[in-house]
Image (cartoon, rainbow, N blue to C red):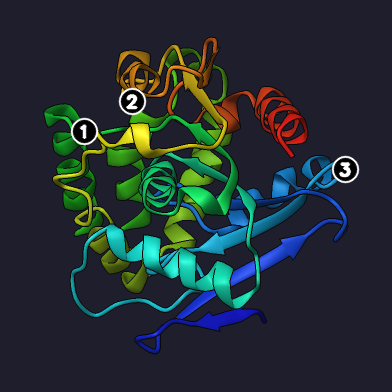
Amino acid sequence: MPYQEMPDGNKLYYEFHGPEEKPVVAFLSGIMMSCASWYIFIEQLTKNLRVMLIDLRDQGKSDHEDHQYDISLHVEDIEHLFSSLNLTKVHLYGISYGAQVAMLYAIKYPNSLKSLILFNAPPRTTPYIAEVGESWKEAAKTHDGERFFTLAIPFAYSYSFYNRNLNWLKERQKMFKKALTPEWFESFIRLASTNVDYSVIGQLGKITCPVLLVGADKDYITPNEEMQLIKNEIPNAEFLTINDAGHASIIERPGEFVTALTGFVLKND
């Protein structure tokens, strides 16, 4: 399996999917996600793109830490990974927590990107997000996947999606109970503690590549007015809204996710 060793000895897991001649898009996942979260989209995405999936520290198959760290550590991991693989210019996609890492990367290494695509991207940790994060950590401390799902997951979806797909969500709840291990919960708590004072407000003007912002009109974790703060500092950024969707917009509106991402990358490759 493809791993890249970091300067401190920890290993980052990654995968490539799609034809080598297609534009490379590196994916940075949300806080509860991993490379496996994207498999349902691979068939559609790889028609036009070469997809690079990355598990950050404490995600998926990457090494898990034994101490607390700051979200900025992921930025240096990503830079080391790109450099080690001789990826000099890539398109970088991030959603939620992954979008926070992506913004920090684009600010520090603006010349390394062809474009930046941000879905449901919080530019700062607001008091509301902080409280949501604390509630998620308390839920994780139970080490019970079913209870964690009940306490944490409803925040992620829109009201209408939850009502329409209750049976599917209940099946996912059962999957959480089977799949989430004590190590996963401890890793999640560390990840959720990396960004408690996160803010890129006032720094976003350093981003020089084309930027696509995609929000959702029923996203209560990152409402569109928060993403507008990013647009204010990057006036040339494109801003799309997915209607009738919550924070997990890619699950609620998969077709719109694939279309928006693919179109923007091809236009800016």
Q: What residue is rendered at 82% in x and 47% in y?
A: 46
User: Is 70 left, or right, of 268 in this rendering?
Assistant: left
Q: Which mark is residue 222?
A: 2
Q: Residues within 10 Å of mark 1 (few under 14, many from 20)?
A: some
Identity, as a three-letter code, of the amino acid under mark 1:
Ile
Asked whether the beta carbons under mark 1 and mark 2 sit within 8 Å of each other, the answer is yes
Residue 145 at x, y percent in the picture? 37, 55
The vertical placement of 214 against 12, above or below, is: above
Residue 37 at x, y percent in the picture? 59, 51
The vertical placement of 252 against 173, above or below, is: above
Identity, as a three-letter code, of the amino acid under mark 2:
Thr
Residue, disc 3: 47
Q: Earlier in the sequence, mark 1 or mark 2?
A: 1
> Could you give the CA–CA distance between mark 1 and mark 2, rounded to whole angstroms?
8 Å
Residue, disc 1: 129
Identity, as a three-letter code, of the amino acid under mark 3:
Lys
- The residue lying toward the viewer, choosing from 179 and 32, is 32
Asked whether the beta carbons under mark 2 and mark 3 sit within 8 Å of each other, the answer is no
Q: Earlier in the sequence, mark 1 or mark 3?
A: 3
The vertical placement of 91 against 168, above or below, is: below
User: Is 9 left, or right, of 69 in this rendering?
Assistant: right
Q: What residue is rendered at 43% in x and 57% in y?
A: 177
> Which quarter of the rendered picture does the N terminus lie within?
bottom right
Q: Toward which corner of the image does residue 266 lie, by quadrant?
A: top right
Q: Is residue 28 visible?
A: no
> Which quarter of the rendered picture does the C terminus lie within?
top right
